[in-house]
Image (tube, rainbow, N blue to C red):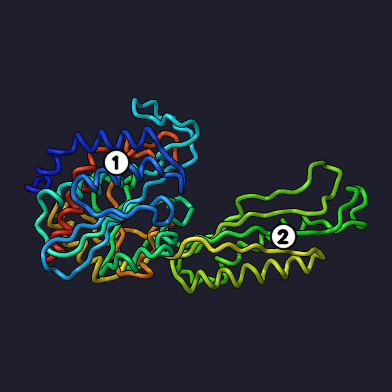
Amino acid sequence: MSTPLLKALNATADEFIGLRRDIHRHPELAFDEHRTSALVAEKLQGWGYAVERGLGGTGLVGQLVRGSGQRRLGLRADMDALPIHEATGLPHASCHDGVMHACGHDGHTAMLLAAAQHLAQSGDFSGTLNLIFQPAEEGGGGALRMMDDGLFDKYPCDAVFAMHNMPGLPQGQLVLREGATMASSDYATVTLTGVGGHGAMPHLATDPIVAAASIVMALQTVVSRNVDPLQMAVVTVGALHAGKANNVIPQSATLELSVRALDRAVRARLEQRIKALIAAQADSLGVAAQIDWRPGYAVLVNTPEETAFASEVALELVGEAHVTLQGLALSGSEDFAFMLERVPGSYLFIGNGDGDSAGACMVHNPGYDFNDANLPIGAAYWALLAQRFLV
């Protein structure tokens, strides 16, 4: 796995490993990525990019126009960290208690910056390159915020691409997939209100805990009986809060739900059936049900033409042995999905390590760290993709 482009990016790898570890040591939560954003802007401006900051709060775009080409490309990296206390014990571990880069966004940012430097100094392309550094991917919807601030109005793109590291896959393996690739994520808080009373006299009360238990069990039938068995759907009751004493029937109970799907129609069906089932169960047991439904991220759908192009670039860069052309869909969510609803494009994965390697530690884990061996590969991929797209 060696090409002139990979050799060139390997030559600058140490610089960007240092940059990545600096970002890792100074993690920032969603919409608080001020230091990271300033660092990215400084680097891009130094390489000749026109930079606009403040999109989506702390997001920014670096644009480089070269030649007479009319095509416009968007490459996106996320910058935010997670509210997790780091337990890696590494020299570059987080210096902020309770905040860490537990998903590799520091690596994604560094990979795109390494590609940005190469393209500015040595890139052979003609057209408009838009590098999108996004805040608040971790549940904050930073993609939507940037789009609301005019991202694609100010910086039109004919296609947009993004990459995420994936523990459990061999380090450096590039995994692509056409079609639905990551699930939607919706959330609901269900408040059941009955009549409290003494546990010894349940006939004088209306028990919301019984109703909650009935609803939890009934919700399991939504996936098994209302969704096509060949479709993916997940309904999880992650929390149930009610009561404080064993001889008191409380007045209310609260359930917290997480709902996921890999198909837009299934997503809509889940919402309709969950709401109807909760209302019917509550009514049958004499309690009132209030449902606070909160739409999360959309289904991430990779478009065919752009995924085929991204696959060709991967095969050219690292060869067939290091590319998976139609990987498995994932039940996790990603707000790049919103960008793909506006602009065609594709989202791919790069293996962070498998087996007993340190890179196999799953994301959102206190022991996770981005695999620095991926920096030159990811950067070379972005550089090659830009040069093949902007012709």
Residue 336: horizontal and vertical position, in percent? Answer: 38, 60
Name the residue type under label 1.
Answer: Gly
Screen quadrant of the C terminus: bottom left
User: Horizontal placement of 335 versus 202: left or right?
Assistant: left
Query: Between disc 2 and disc 1, whose residue precedes?
Result: 2
Q: Which residue is mark 2?
A: 214
Residue 187: horizontal and vertical position, in percent? Answer: 57, 59
Q: Residue 358, located in which quarter of the rendered image?
A: top left
Residue 373: horizontal and vertical position, in percent? Answer: 22, 39
Viewer-proximal residue, 226 or 249? Answer: 249
Secondary element under disc 1, as helix, strand or loop, is strand
User: Horizontal placement of 160 versus 266: left or right?
Assistant: left
Which residue corresponds to the image point at 44% horizontal and 51% vertical from the top-left?
A: 136
For the question of whether residue 340 can be seen, the reply is yes
Q: Residue 93, located in which quarter of the rendered image?
A: top left
Is the residue 116 above or below the residue 194 in the image? above
Q: Nearer the viewer, mark 2 or mark 1?
A: 1
User: Horizontal placement of 332 versus 158: left or right?
Assistant: right
For the question of whether residue 322 can be seen, the reply is no
Marks 2 and 1, Cα distance to the nearest angstrom?
Answer: 43 Å
Secondary element under disc 2, as helix, strand or loop, is helix
Which residue corresponds to the image point at 86% horizontal and 57% vertical from the top-left?
A: 195
User: Horizontal placement of 251 versus 128: left or right?
Assistant: right
Which residue corresponds to the image point at 72% horizontal and 60% vertical from the top-left?
A: 214
Is the residue 295 above or below the residue 268 in the image? above
> Looking at this rendering, what residue extends furthest in the left direction?
4
Disc number for residue 128: none
How crowded pointer 2 is (Cα within 10 Å; few <14, some 14-19, many 20+) is rated as some
Disc number for residue 353: 1
Residue 343: horizontal and vertical position, in percent? Answer: 32, 69
Name the residue type under label 2.
Answer: Ser
